[in-house]
Amino acid sequence: MPSPGASLIPDLLAGSRRALAQTISAIEDGVVEAPALLSALYPHTGRAHVIGVTGAPGTGKSTLVNALAKAYRAAGKTVGVIAVDPTSPFSGGALLGDRVRMRDLAGDPGIFIRSMATRGSLGGLARATADVISVLDAAGFERILVETVGVGQAEVDIASAAHTTLVVEAPGLGDEVQAIKAGVLEIADLFAVNKADREGADRTVLVLQMMQGLAPAPTGHHRATAGSALPQPGPQEDGSWLPPILKTVATRGDGVEALREWIERHAAYLRALDGWSRREAARAATELERILRDRLLAHLLAALPADRLAQMVTAIVRREIDPYTAAEQLLTQAV
Ligand SMILES: Nc1nc2c(ncn2[C@@H]2O[C@H](COP(=O)(O)OP(=O)(O)OP(=O)(O)O)[C@@H](O)[C@H]2O)c(=O)[nH]1
Ligand SMILES: [Mg+2]
């Protein structure tokens, strides 16, 4: 089989979708040329605005990403979409559903959609996602939307890979605000309260406002809020950003254009306040640490006898050794 080598790069940069798809597959498969491909592409990256979309299962992330992608196309921007699903096996139904929903975007050369599911660890998925973001960036896509399900580490990972993080909430999914549980409130630059056609959307907005410290808790007392101006979302006088809370009905496209405009406003805010380069620095640091960790671990494992790690694990389980001492011994043995 011919290696998916550097010959792909000129075609990818010239806009070939075939070269793009092949490059992504090569990187997902972890072929030996993958690091070289990414190195060659790196000088062409750094132009895209990466938008992470996260939230609890079923809040309507895919539908919203689909609608946002359309809004961006209408605004003349090219869009890359990455749907990351850490919960689904590779050919899972959820991904199939996503593809079906995104069908109306197919055939448009200004958009490229890629579904990714976990093959192995969540960490592996985060790495592949960061790499695919780089490839789409190099290929010239101006906006990159990355959907990930808000479970565990995934949403925190996405925040470190994105310039702008959109947290999607929806009424009627059990918890009033699903983000409380997942702890994604801190990473949100914008909130979408999707399914605003359903009962309880205003309540979800209110709870989010309460959590932002804007609305007082509904204690039943008469509230004298009439005169006191609430802070407006967006850039604040102290240079911080107050995340806007936007109601959307993704299935109908309601509120999606306003959401798109707020995403653009957030990018402008980051650029104006040096926040863009700070986020770029944070992204680069995460990336470098991740690569170093992988490489160091690979080096270490290569330097150890094949079953040494498994022996250590057994010894730890039997309480013959503790994990700290075990790690120390492996490190000493490897160098
Ligand atoms: N009523 C209503 N239904 C919606 C809205 N947006 C999405 N849905 C429906 O909600 C269901 C879930 O939507 P998805 O877009 O798949 O949600 P998701 O968050 O991507 O789901 P996962 O990827 O599985 O976590 C689908 O049946 C959608 O048609 C909305 O604004 N209103
Ligand atoms: Mg989805």
Image (cartoon, grey):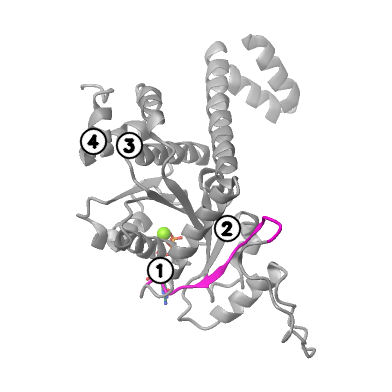
| Amino acid type at image mark 4 | Ala
Residue toward you, 298 or 212? 212
| Amino acid type at image mark 3 | Ile
Residue under the point 38% across and 65% down: 63
User: Which badge, 2 or 1, is on the more N-terminal residue?
Assistant: 2
Q: Residue beneath label 1, please?
A: 257
Q: Residue beneath label 4, please?
A: 14
Q: Which residues are magenta?
A: 237-251
| Amino acid type at image mark 2 | Asp
Query: Which circle marks residue 189 in the picture?
Result: 2
Q: CA distance from mark 4 to mark 2?
A: 34 Å
Task: Between label 2 and label 3, give the one nearer the viewer.
Answer: 2
Q: Residues within 10 Å of mark 2 (few under 14, many from 20)?
A: many
Task: Between label 4 and label 2, give the one nearer the viewer.
Answer: 4
Q: Left or right: 99 with respect to 227? A: left
Tally of marks: 4
Residue under the point 70% across and 78% down: 229
